[in-house]
Structures are given as structure tokens and as C-alpha cells.
Amino acid sequence: MTLRPSSFPPRPNNLYETEPWATEALLRHVDISDKTIWEPAAGRHKMARVLARRALHVITSDIVHYEVRHDHIFDFLQQDDHEMMLRPDGIITNPPYGPQNRDAVRFCELALQRTHGIVAMLMTAKFDSGSTRSHLLRDNPRFRAKIVLVDRIQWFPGSYGGTEDHAWFVWGPQSPFPSPPILRYEGKATA
């Protein structure tokens, strides 16, 4: 498979909005019905709106407002969460990836520090192939699942579709009886 750069210009602040079906695919496997969820890269709230239909409460934040106001302006990578005094039951987001996925790795590390509950990150499907990520995946007893999206996400309205495969990477609470992570496949729901 040949990888080539996108023909689309990069978006400011890595604002790539997740189609609702991709979040719904996660929620077919992760129960958030009694949870307060923090969406820290909320953008225009496409993901947050889907989460709000299932969660007890959704807290939104991002580094700037994008036509929709967030609960907080907060730089997840740079600011200390004690500034907001949040202790959510879970953190679910499509983080900015950054060069060589370094920002995505840092997002995962910080999310795992900032909640003892559910963490779900939408990443490229090959995110788990990096040897520098074993502390998040292979060697992390909280890592629970990889949910591969069999349909591609369309990041640009009017385009023919995505060119990259994605998956949800899911961590849960620490358990005295850890079990091996599971692999699932999901896509757009069929009627």
C-alpha cells in the first residue's frame, strides 16, 4: 500500500470533525449511560452531541471556540487539569495526532492520568504498531479494546471519502483481574 499526502490543505488546530456514525460505532461497545464524559478536543461538537445522547453529562473543551461554545477553553496538552478541577468518569475524543503521532500519544498519556475510568481515542488503525507506544497498549493493563472501523471517515464535506483507516482504542478502569484486550470491527449501522 502506498501512502501519499492528502490533497486537502491542513486544517488549523487539526480540526478534523468526526462523523456521527464513528462515535455511534464506539458506543455500541462502551456503556456511558451513567457517566460524566469529557470531550477535550470538541471542535464544533459533532462527537459531543452523539455522546450527550447516551451519557449522564458531557463536558466540552478545546483550545478555541469553533462557532459553538465549549464549557471550557482548555489546552489539553499544555494546561494542568487542576485549573478546571475536573474528574470525569471518562474521556472520549478524536485527538490531534501531530507529527509521528506524538500529540496523540501525549493525549492518551494525559487522559489516562486525568481519569481512572474509560478512555477512548479515535486514531489511525495502525496506531498500535508503534514500538514507542507499548506503554499505552501492550504493557498497559488498562488497555481493553481496539475497535476497527471498517468504513472510512469522511473528513472533508463533499469529498469522496477517507483514504485512511481508523480505530477506537479503549482503556478502562484498573482491574485486579486484568483480561487481554479484545478486537472488534464496526462500521456504519445498517437499517
Image (tube, rainbow, N blue to C red):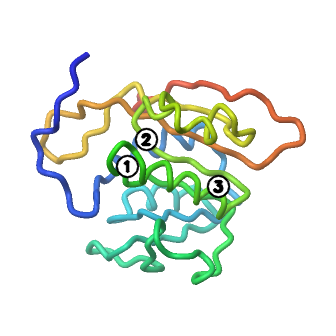
Q: Is residue 65 left or right of residue 7?
A: right
Structural distance between the alpha carbons of marks 1 and 3: 17 Å
Q: Is residue 54 left or right of residue 96?
A: right
Q: Where is residue 150 in the image (x, y as percent from the top left)?
A: 40, 25
Name the kind of residue labelled 3 in the image. Leu
**Count of number-bearing discs:** 3
Depth check: give the residue in front, 152 or 174.
174
Q: Where is residue 20 in the image (x, y as percent from the top left)?
A: 38, 48
Task: Say which mark, if any, is on residue 112.
Answer: 3
Name the kind of residue labelled 2 in the image. Met
Q: Residue at x 65, y 80 (%)?
A: 85
Label located before the other in sequence (2 or 1): 1
Residue labelled with disc 1: 97
Q: Residue at x 42, y 41 (%)?
A: 22
Farthest bottom residue in view: 83
Q: Residue at x 79, y 30 (%)?
A: 179
Label located before the other in sequence (3 or 2): 3
Q: Position of residue 34 (x, y in %)?
A: 71, 59
Name the kind of residue labelled 1 in the image. Tyr
Q: In this view, does 16 lie to the left or right of 128?
A: left
Label located before the other in sequence (1 or 3): 1
Q: Residue at x 66, y 51 (%)?
A: 118
Q: Position of residue 24 (x, y in %)?
A: 48, 43
Dot 2 lies on which element?
strand
Position above or below: 22 against 46: above
